[in-house]
Amino acid sequence: MQIKGTKSGLLLHLPDRPLSDAVAQLRERLSAQPGFYQGSRAVLLLGSEPAQSAELAAVIATLEQFGIIADGAVCDSDDVAQLAKSAGLRLVGASIAASPRARDDRIAPHDERSHARDRSGKKAQSNGQLVGAGETMYHKGTVRSGQSLSSRGNIVVIGDVNAGGELIAAGDILVWGALRGVAHAGAEGDAQAKVFALRLEPMQLRIATKVAVAPDERRKKPAAEVARLRGGGIVTEPAT
């Protein structure tokens, strides 16, 4: 069990089983500095090994005892994802786990919303629109290497996404151009999310908890495609 602090919250690494062992370690660690983490939010990195619901509930209860709110979970298997959702945790992608919310924006007003930032922490250009859950972020122009756009709704890019660029959306992703970077749709666990692109050539593609990488061979005649979950994996097919 490890606790890592970030500017906006905590990352709690819980790869080992049983989780009851982590509860004892967590209590000991937090008791050594009571009040130090009070008011923080934490994302739980639960790994891929199955666990008991009572054990996860004990982890969450221990955090709450010390004033820490479990803000979400990163899960590497469907079983663990289902466990996290049953415990009331939102699912987040590993790529955004290092930025847990500083407050509960699930009930925030519409003028206090998530927005795009590049990896230097500077605000990214997205046509001035700040979006909340269920809404759509529009970005006109190329998403360059090192730039990351994230939204608790959908993302629409009018332009290309270069290799090294990143899109992370709780909903769907649509790229009116070539997608050659990383795209993660359904980042909060929505298995119905989709990724559309006029040219779908991502370095990595994620939908909910599933991951796929592009084949080495590129299509000679690129055409608009959509990626979605089917049969337990990510499939691509012509967009109609």
Image: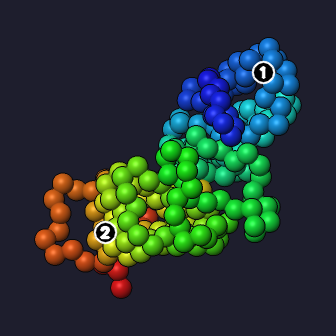
Residue underneath mark 1: 30
Q: What residue is shown at x 33% (from left), y 73% (from top)?
A: 177
Q: Position of residue 173 (x, y in %)?
A: 47, 68
Q: Position of residue 97 (x, y in %)?
A: 58, 43
Is residue 184 something one can see in this rendering? no
Instruction: Pick whichever of labels 2 and 1 is earlier in the sequence.
Output: 1
Tag 2: residue type?
Answer: Ala
| Figure quadrant of the C terminus | bottom left
Q: Quadrant of residue 160?
A: bottom left
Q: Quadrant of residue 71?
A: top right
Total marks shown come to: 2
Secondary structure beneath dot 1 equals helix
Left or right of residue 228: residue 135: right
Residue underneath mark 2: 178
Nearer to the camera, 148 or 206: 148
| Figure quadrant of the N terminus | top right
Left or right of residue 92: residue 35: right
Q: Position of residue 95 (x, y in %)?
A: 50, 46
Q: Is residue 21 above or below residue 120?
A: above
Is residue 41 something one can see in this rendering? yes
Q: Is residue 120 above or below residue 240?
A: above
Front: mark 2 or 1: 2
Secondary structure beneath dot 2 equals strand
Q: What residue is shown at x 13% (from left), y 71% (from top)?
A: 220
Q: Is residue 33 above or below residue 177?
A: above
